[in-house]
């Protein structure tokens, strides 16, 4: 039987720098595939449809829900986010490793459906650093910052459910740690087909 791909889930607080870390991970593991999520929110500056997300309308999202096209989906604030079945099962069956970026609710759902997936939470060096990063983005109002911080406090309680937690103090160092985790997971006996290792060819 062909080797199945590995599913990696990365989560982290808003503003923790997940995007930069993940890009460095993809640079280090070129055959790693990013699972593009769907969202009903508008693109931010620099984001591209079909690259960062599939940007669709709320009506289109709800149609996909009716058609059972999502593995998981959630509504955060006023926007939908969801993972398409087609983005996961196809590549995994072909032996391709797939990386997902999800919030804690989505990650919990994926862990239920794919118990052997690897979950990694990216943490900030401190809450003060994270708050400064959020303010530095220039996209947060006073009210939205308050909501973000409340969400961070809530999400923080879920970190203990992850397989790994990596601090993003320096993006390159954080990315190297994530790459090391992925490489180490591939070496687990449970992920290797060793049945024929000691079978004689004679």
Image (cartoon, rainbow, N blue to C red):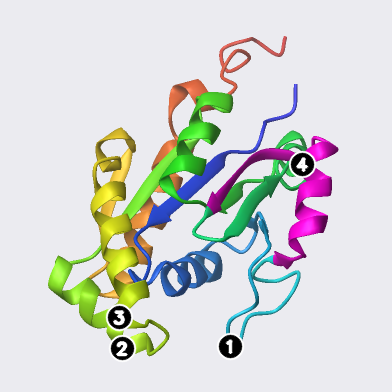
**What is the count of numbered marks?**
4
Of badges 4 and 3, nearer the viewer stands 3
Label 4 secondary element: helix
Whether residue 25 sits left or right of residue 1 in the image: it is left
Residue at point 24%, 42% (across, down): 157
User: Few, some or many C-alpha atoms within 10 Å of disc 3 (few <14, some 14-19, many ≥20)?
Assistant: few
Of badges 3 and 1, nearer the viewer stands 3
Label 1 secondary element: loop
Q: Give residue 84's position: percent from left, percent from top.
A: 73, 46
Residue 65 numbered mark, or none? 4
Q: Which residue is mark 2?
A: 136
Q: Which residue is mark 3?
A: 142
Instruction: Specify start and end residues of the magenta stretch as a single range.
Output: 54-75
Give me the C-alpha separation between circle 4 and circle 3.
33 Å
Label 2 secondary element: helix
Q: Are marks 2 and 4 in contact (CB under 8 Å)?
A: no
Whether residue 55 sits left or right of residue 6 in the image: it is right
Q: Which residue is mark 1?
A: 45
The one nearer the camera, 70 or 11, is: 70
Give me the C-alpha separation between circle 2 and circle 4.
35 Å
Of badges 1 and 4, nearer the viewer stands 4
Of badges 2 and 3, nearer the viewer stands 3
Which of disc 1 and disc 2 is earlier in sequence?
Answer: 1
């Amino acid at each position: 039987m062909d080797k199945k791909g590995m599913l990696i889930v990365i989560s982290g607080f808003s503003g923790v720098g997940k995007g930069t870390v993940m890009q460095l991970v993809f640079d280090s593991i070129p055959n790693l595939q990013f699972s593009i999520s769907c969202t009903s929110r508008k693109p931010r500056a620099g984001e591209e449809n079909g690259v960062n997300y599939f940007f669709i309308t709320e009506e289109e999202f709800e149609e996909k829900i009716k058609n059972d096209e999502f593995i998981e989906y959630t509504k955060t604030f006023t926007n939908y986010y969801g993972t398409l079945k087609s983005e996961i099962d196809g590549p995994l069956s072909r032996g391709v490793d797939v990386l997902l970026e999800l919030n804690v609710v989505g990650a919990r759902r994926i862990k239920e459906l794919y118990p052997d997936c690897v979950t990694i939470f990216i943490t900030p060096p401190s809450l003060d650093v994270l708050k400064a990063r959020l303010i530095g983005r220039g996209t947060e109002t006073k009210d939205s910052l308050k909501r973000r911080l409340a969400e961070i406090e809530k999400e923080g309680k879920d970190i203990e459910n992850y397989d790994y937690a990596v601090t993003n103090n320096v993006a390159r160092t954080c990315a190297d740690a994530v790459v090391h985790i992925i490489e180490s997971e591939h070496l687990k006996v449970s992920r290797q087909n060793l049945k024929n290792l000691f079978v004689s060819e004679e």
